[in-house]
Image (cartoon, helix red, strand yellow):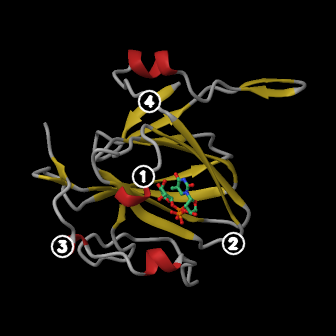
Amino acid sequence: MEIAALAIPEVKLLTPRKHGDDRGFFSEVYNKKVLAEAGIDIDFVQDNHTWSVEAGTLRGLHFQAPPFAQDKLVRVVRGSIFDVAVDLRRGSPTFGQYVSATISAAAWNQILMPIGFAHGFVTLEPDCEVLYKVSDYYAPEHDMGVAWNDPDIAIDWPLNGRDAKLSEKDRKLPLLKDLPEVFVYDD
Ligand SMILES: Cc1cn([C@H]2C[C@H](O)[C@@H](COP(=O)(O)OP(=O)(O)O[C@H]3O[C@H](C)C(=O)[C@H](O)[C@H]3O)O2)c(=O)[nH]c1=O
């Protein structure tokens, strides 16, 4: 498992090994012990699976507020996504900044973001399937978000001239400046 830090170092890019042979491949895509040995000790409790039909499908920017905040480990088993983590931790030197990575079945990579970040992605091709682990259960009453196109975050989404396909909920998410304080930076 290769593990690299992105520009906001709490967000990691993971690349599991693929063991190929004439049948295909085998890959340990999650190993709690391997991550713990790398200092990433997270108890994931729920697996999510989303399928997006069209390229340009944009889900985000979402997070769950404490006490149901979630670490997330995201991977793609069909297609590719432009994945984004936005630092929402008040007091963080990178508050309101984002990191991004292209996560794809072809690259066989994953992105890990801790509690304190909003998550979103846009699909780069049709028929994308995204699987991700979260470290707390779904809590709809604590499900929150930030507008995908917040000018203060200014995410450079690769929409390639198409309109983002958004849920009604995501069309109405607040701007970062209007969010209540939910996460505090704990360096
Ligand atoms: C998140 C979630 C949703 N649901 C139900 C609620 C709705 O009936 C339906 C679709 O939910 P939603 O529109 O919130 O799905 P996404 O827009 O893909 O939301 C996700 O998108 C971004 C990228 C995330 O990181 C979050 O995990 C999550 O917010 O699934 C559940 O039953 N369990 C869950 O854990």
Give percent across and percent down for residue 77. 69, 46
**Amino acid marked by disc 4:** Ile
Q: Secondary structure at mark 2?
A: loop
- Give left or right: position of 172 versus 92: right
Could you tell me how far apart the alpha carbons at marks 2 and 1 are, in whole angstroms? 27 Å
- Give left or right: position of 178 versus 160: left
Looking at this rendering, what residue extends furthest in the left direction?
91
Residue neighbourhood size for the residue with mark 3, other residues' Cα within 10 Å, grouped as few (<14), some (14–19), many (≥20)? few
Question: Cβ(mark 1) to ligand 1 < 8 Å?
Answer: no
Give percent across and percent down for residue 28. 64, 24
**Amino acid marked by disc 1:** Ala
Question: Cβ(mark 4) to ligand 1 < 8 Å?
Answer: no
Residue neighbourhood size for the residue with mark 4, other residues' Cα within 10 Å, grouped as few (<14), some (14–19), many (≥20)? some
Pair 3/2: label in front: 3
Could you tell me how far apart the alpha carbons at marks 1 and 3 are, in whole angstroms? 23 Å
Could you tell me how far apart the alpha carbons at marks 4 and 2 are, in whole angstroms? 30 Å
- Residue indicated by mark 4: 3
Which of the numbered marks, if any, corresponds to residue 54?
Answer: 2
